[in-house]
Amino acid sequence: SVGQTIARAELQKAEAEVARIRSEIEKRTLRAPFSGVVTAVDVEKGGAVSLSNSAVSLISAGDLEIESFIPEINISNLSVGDPALVTLDAYGEAATFGARVVSIDPAETVRDGLSTYRVKFHFDAQDERIRPGMTANIVVTTDARSGVIAIPQGVVKEENGRKTVTVLEAGKKQTRTITTGAVSSLGTIEVLSGLSAGDILLIKE
């Protein structure tokens, strides 16, 4: 009937208007790509925004990560999965947090004229003490060995390809030839042969 046709047309017109309003609302709605907490709003009502400027800052409610830039001279020692020990300036060296390397950028990033590679770490566990923006100090374990003898690298003397150290035997100084292995980032060097547990090594003569 004519009445039903008019009613149907009015309904379609109303539905189209609802769709238009919803579309306008969507255009004016900001949706975050992840769940989190808004930490800053840098715009005001009526203000202009652009793609190059931040309007809203949002921190993820999930796991926090650490971003560090490693010099190219050290990057070859790192691998995804390497464990790390983290301290935060806010809590001092007594409070340590476990972390792990989760990604290493394949391309370099030049910082202050030096070639570096961006490395990301994830904390092993959530901790309410860890907050965004904190300064982190990271020690990464790239190689762990047990049952080895390690001595300060500076006490090893080398001449004509022969490496020696000075030990105390029966109250007398003796020169001992050694072979060495890996050098740690802490300044110690692995001794493969020439020294045994219990030997007295003279650091200063």
Image: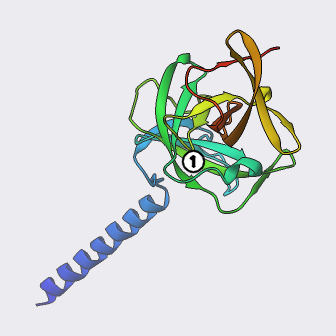
The vertical placement of 94 against 24, above or below, is above
**In this figure, which residue is indicated by the disc labeled 1?**
120
Q: Residue furthest top?
A: 171
Which residue does the image show at 52% across and 40% down from the upper left?
A: 145
On the image, the x and y values in percent for residue 138 come to 60, 33
Which residue does the image show at 48% across and 53% down from the upper left?
A: 30
- Observer-nearest of 38 and 178: 178
20 on left or right of 94? left
On the image, the x and y values in percent for residue 155 come to 78, 26
**To which quarter of the image does residue 2 belong?**
bottom left
- Residue type, mark 1 in image: Lys
In the rendered picture of this protein, how many numbered marks are placed on residues?
1
Task: Specify the quadrant that holds the C terminus.
Answer: top right
Label 1 sits on a secondary structure element that is strand
The vertical placement of 198 against 176, above or below, is above
Which residue does the image show at 48% across and 38% down from the upper left?
A: 99
The vertical placement of 51 against 143, above or below, is below
131 on left or right of 175? left
